[in-house]
Amino acid sequence: MSVIICTSPPSEFPNEFFPNYNLSVFQKWALKGIVEGDNVLITAHTGSGKTLPAEYAIQHFHQLKKKVIYASPIKALSNQKLYDMRKKYPHISFGLLTGDCKDNPEADVLIMTTEILRNTLFNIQGNTDKHGNNKQSIMPLSFNIDIENDLAAVVFDEVHYINDVDRGSVWEQSILLLPPHVQLIMLSATIDRPDEFASWIAREKQLQAIASNKSVKNMYLVSTNERVVPLTHYMWLAVHNGTINKAAKTPYEKKLEDINSKPIVIADAKGVYNETNFYKVKDILDYNYKNNIYVKRQFVLDSLVRYLNVNNMLPAICFVFSRKHVEQAAKECSFSLFEADSGIPALIDKECKHILMTKLPNYKEYLELPEYLAIVKLLEKGIAIHHAGIMPVLREMIELLFEKGYIKLLFATETFAVGINMPTKTVIFAGLTKFNGQTMRLLYSHEYTQMAGRAGRRGIDTIGHVFHCNNLFELPSSTDYKHMLTGPPQKLTSKFKISFNLALNICTCKHDNILEHFTSKTLLSSDIKNELTHYIKEETVLVEALKHSQICLDLSRTPKAVLLKYKELENALQSTTNSARKKIRMELNALEVEHKFLSKDMKYLEAYMDAEQKIKDNTLTQENNKGYIKSIIDCVENILFDNEFINEAKELSEKGLIASQIQEVHPLMLADTYIETKGFAEFTPIEIAAVFSCFNNINVSDEFKTYIVNDNNSVNDNKVNKIVNFMQKQLDYYYELETKNIINTGSSYDINFDLVSYIIRWCECTNEIECKLVIQDIKGEKHIFLGEFIKAILKINNICSEIEKICEMNGNLSLLEKIKQIPTYTLKYVVTNQSLYI
């Protein structure tokens, strides 16, 4: 096993699928690694062409009649990949598995979210014994591939998601669960010290290969820090002419004229930061502030967009860090971006209808939506919006129109920067700070780079442009600004958590100490070992410092016993009462008089004691690090045992088997709820849907939020209320256990009651008018977007899918029948899992 770091061009490389494409050095190395059957880690900037090796692999393995899995971080990216791949390679069959959608699961190439891959790999392991033989299959699988004989490779798109606090563990688990003969093709943004990440994977895959008597693969580390299309970053200030006139005959008249509505380079195409220009802009902003000069967003964006339009720098994406402000900013654009004689505005409505009607049998329902009409109105000016609150179908329609070149200016939130393949000529930042859950903070360097990297289209543009609307936000310090623009890429560190679900799924394998064995192979374990190495090296330095302090102390002219007595009295002085302090001070003074070198020699004692304490702290840290993973495993397993999810032999109980199949919500809580309700025996499908609605991810502002489940006279509602309160109690119980044991399993403890009554009403709707009324009430009373409501409905259905698998496992046919009815109640009108990409 070795990590092959690829820098200079390879002497030869395969290229039968892209003969006319001018390949970059990193692409040539990636293709070579794929054909030679080795693992490949590609780290490169957005828009540099790192997807090409993945597409090469798909074609290569299709020729060999092997299958490929393409794992992506988000559902929207999965859908778009399916659409792109089917269009590019019609001779290859592609399928999709995202939780919301399942299409052609028998295909040669399966595109899926990483969570589905991980869950299926766990269930495959659960269906085999420790000798690798198939047991009677009890774990349901999302897809059936003969991994041993048919699966050639897995492409991990956006593998830097392993750094994601909430979901990173999924990538780590998937990489470890895949057998060593399966090639890993990993696509990542630029990361700091990628060799450490590559070495971890190479080491663990080598150990797996040796243990299973398979051939060991090399790891090709293929990195590039160069952008194919370089970026120039500009500051942009706009002021009214009246402001310049008021500054007449002062130094600021010329300063304002020189900077007003002109691109001011803050970082050039080589990444060199321009501090002089920073302070020029800061000077004007300080002047504006002192003179109470404020400029509205509409004026600033209008001035910038007119400049871009005149100078052929469109299309552009403008990042705004709020869904509400995305829509406001788009509406504020006061003019059309099309040429006066352009025929596109007249075609927009027709084109939108055509896109919808070719895919959706109920397309007419979309055409009447206020959201659709507002979007078309913007599109007729060449403007569009994109954020998670827009319903998926309309988001996809916008993406397709962008691809066709009908959109000149797109206002979007940060989520647009993740994976969606929509490069542009220019990127605009209306702000540089985002809310982190508690306060506003400046973008991290890698976040900024990911978004700015959308500018500059390979093969189209020679340079990409990035503009900051500096009127619209408080200017950070020059140091912080520079770090954001030119700082190092993110370093991958493990976000692995020993979750209840992981422990339960590992228990299904029934191998001795397998959870401890599995976690010992993780990037987390590797990080801990590296940290231990640091502390061991530090310990050597500390021991030498202690020896030096001991020598100095031994040479001191004040006896050590006197020094210790003096230290004891000093400590006592800090904690004693006023009445005793006088006596202590007298004793201290007496010692100082008797031993004239005491003050100087005390420094030697303090240095010795400080070195001694540092060694103790270092030893304690080493012990804690060594036992860190084991202590968490013990806590998690004790909680599972105490609450009857596993027995003393770490075998799953019936409740444990139920919990092992739950990923969408807290597994222990929902398993408890299943047992408490005897498999929801007395609940109707609509009541079950209402119960599951408590686990939507919608953020309702405090003034409109429901804090207690409504308690009315309806028998059905009382039944729902009672079990929802039970779920809240169980969540509180498990949260307290985690807090008490000082562990973090990564479990979600969120529960909200905002949609319970609306879901009951929604499920009872029988026609379009009733559906519209419920949606209208939700928007008016809860102030949430239609897209968020659709997402909440799909979440309910995803929970139902997990319960459906549980019913199939334990033979609960009564509940299975109810669960299968739920989508018929929830999916109606425009609230569907339809996609224009499928």
Image: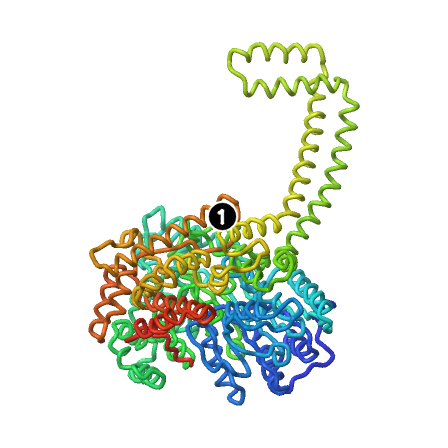
Q: Image quarter for residue 186?
A: bottom right
- Residue 610 x, y percent position in the rendering: 67, 31
Residue at the spot 68% in from the left edge and 80% down from the top edge: 35
Q: How many marks?
A: 1
The residue that disc 1 covers is 738
Q: Residue furthest bottom?
A: 91
Q: From the viewer's perspective, is residue 321 above or below residue 103?
A: above
Give the image location of residue 296, x and y in percent.
31, 58
Mark 1 secondary-structure assignment: helix
Front residue (pair 466, 796): 796
Q: Tell me: residue 337, above or below residue 631.
A: below
Q: Quadrant of the C terminus?
A: bottom left
Q: 237 and 565: which one is in front?
A: 565
Q: Residue at x 31, y 63 (%)?
A: 682
Viewer-side residue, 568 vs 18: 568
Image location of residue 816, percent across then percent down: 39, 71
**Residue 570 image offset from top left, x and y in percent:** 61, 19
Q: Amino acid at mark 1?
A: Glu
Camera sees residue 834? yes
* Residue 458 in the figure: left or right of residue 251: right
Residue 298: image quadrant is bottom left
Residue 524, placed above or below residue 124? above
Q: Is residue 245 visible?
A: no
Q: Residue, x 43% and y 69% (percent of image)?
A: 807
Local packing at callout 1 (Cα closer than 10 Å; few below 14, some 14-19, many 20+) is some
In screen coordinates, is 615 left or right of 498?
Answer: right
Q: Quadrant of the N terminus?
A: bottom right
